[in-house]
Amino acid sequence: MKVVAVTGADNIATVYMAEMDGKMIEFVEALQPPYRREERWILMVSTLFGCPVKCQICDAGGQYQGKPTAEQILSQVDYMVTRWYPDRRVPASKFKIQFARMGEPALNMAVLDALEQLPQRFEAPGLIPSISTIAPYGRDAFFERLVDLKDRLYPGGRFQFQFSLHTTDLNLRRRLMPVRTWSFEQMAAYADRFLRPGDRKITLNFALAVGSPVQPEVLLRHFDPQKFLIKITPVNPTCRAVQHGLVSYIDPYDSASGAVLADGLRSHGYEVIVSIGEVRENQIGSNCGQYVLKYLESRQPLKDGYTFVVNTLSG
């Protein structure tokens, strides 16, 4: 792996662009202000070269060129860890590794091989791997093996699992994520097999656009509030969101944005998180759905997105 360009700021987030076997990939490290790196540190790695799903809010879709090996996935983690901790000892009490920069992780079994190796690769007592998925149809082998892996290596709340829903309107969801996915019934049934006492609740994520309904009665029909929590996030500024006319329901500049929706869901028994990140991450291009290489290719002007300078590395 050769890192060829970088953008961002060490005190917020950094995006690395790298070449692997003639293919390009991105990975990210980020902080959660006001916490220091020694307290909370988040890494995001790519699990595919491109992505065949082509979600309407995500710039990482398209130009699919195959699957990285487990070693290629872990090399992204290695690069960021050894930059700050050459001895591979990560002191952060919360050290989250999200398999979420580019690619639907369930489409690559090597993600599971990487998860098998993580605990031996670093001395990191705060390690929490995180898988976020649209639950593509036909990937049962991935999800069933994940249950066993989580139980063996990451019990007691040391693993985070998330379904990306984005709306409770199934027809709209199919447009936003134009591939066949599990039904809500299948997701709920999987939760019964996945969860053990002490595990974190499964997250239902809504990167919510204006006009995308989130109906409590639909959620309650399938998703037990004792097993699932709800996270509501902005639609981050991406080229594809603009192309598809998607406007964020959540205002990233308003900390109270989404409060009415969140309170309504809480009244039905759900734990709800309205997650509005650091807006400078949008400008860096490090937030979920963003992909700097896509912007560099298109040069499509975006309000509040991809404004940081990308520095090319020599050598």
Image: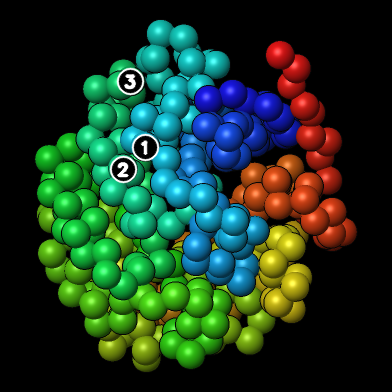
Name the residue nearer the viewer: 126 or 235. 235
Q: Position of residue 263 (x, y in %)?
A: 50, 76
Whether residue 1 appears in this view of the structure is yes
Q: Is residue 131 left or right of residue 308?
A: left
Q: Residue furthest right?
A: 301
Q: Which residue is mark 2?
A: 110
Q: Are marks 1 and 2 in contact (CB under 8 Å)?
A: yes
Q: Quadrant of the C terminus?
A: top right
Q: Is residue 253 left or right of residue 161?
A: right
Q: Amino acid at mark 2?
A: Ala
Mark 1 vs mark 2, CA separation in Å: 6 Å
Q: Position of residue 163 (x, y in %)?
A: 38, 65
Neighbourhood count class around disc 3 (C-alpha, 10 Å): few under 14, some 14–19, many 20 upward: some
* Total number of numbered discs in the rendering: 3
Q: Amino acid at mark 1?
A: Thr
Q: Are marks 2 and 3 in contact (CB under 8 Å)?
A: no
2 or 3: tag closer to the N-terminus: 2
Residue 122 bears which disc, if any? 3
Residue 222 bears which disc, if any? none
Q: Residue at x 70, y 46 (%)?
A: 292
Q: Is residue 37 left or right of residue 219?
A: right
Q: Which residue is mark 1?
A: 69
Q: Position of residue 43 (x, y in %)?
A: 49, 36
Q: Disc 3 on helix, strand or loop?
A: loop
